[in-house]
Image: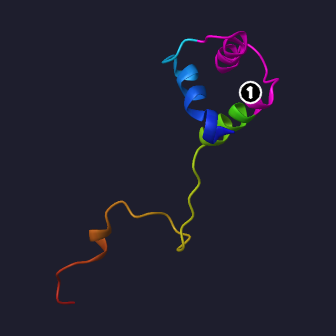
Amino acid sequence: MLECCGQAFNELDLGKRQPQTEEEKLFVALCRGECEPVTPEEKVWSKYMTRISRPKRFHTLSGGKPQLNPSEDYTDSDD
């Protein structure tokens, strides 16, 4: 559904496209948080926006904190 309608949904959401039908006007109201998703299209868009706006998780292999300046670990001394 997002593949065929996602561009139009995004343009309506961003205000780049004016709603032409009553369904599009309701979709814009959904994007503004004025109503809950009702149609399958609205539900998909709402779920999609929720997923992409979450903070991204990342995992490290070391399990430690990242170093601020890795060059501090190395010195030129002859110890």
Look at the image and tell me in which quarter the N terminus lies. top right
Front one among 5 and 69:
5
**Dot 1: few (<14), some (14–19), or many (≥20) neighbours within 10 Å?**
many
- 65 relative to 45 in the view: left or right: left
Quadrant of the rendered image containing residue 33: top right
Residue type highlighted by circle 1: Glu
Residue 41 falls in image quadrant: top right
| Mark 1, residue position | 42
Residue 1, relative to residue 59: is it above or below? above
Where residue 44 appears, x then y in whole percent?
A: 73, 35
Query: Residue 2, how many percent across, how many down?
Result: 65, 39
Residue drawn at (52%, 68%) of the image:
64
Q: Is residue 26 magenta?
A: yes
Q: Where's residue 13, x and y in %? A: 58, 22
Pick the quarter of the image with the C terminus: bottom left
Q: Secondary structure at mark 1?
A: helix
Residue 19 place in picture, x, y as percent = 60, 12
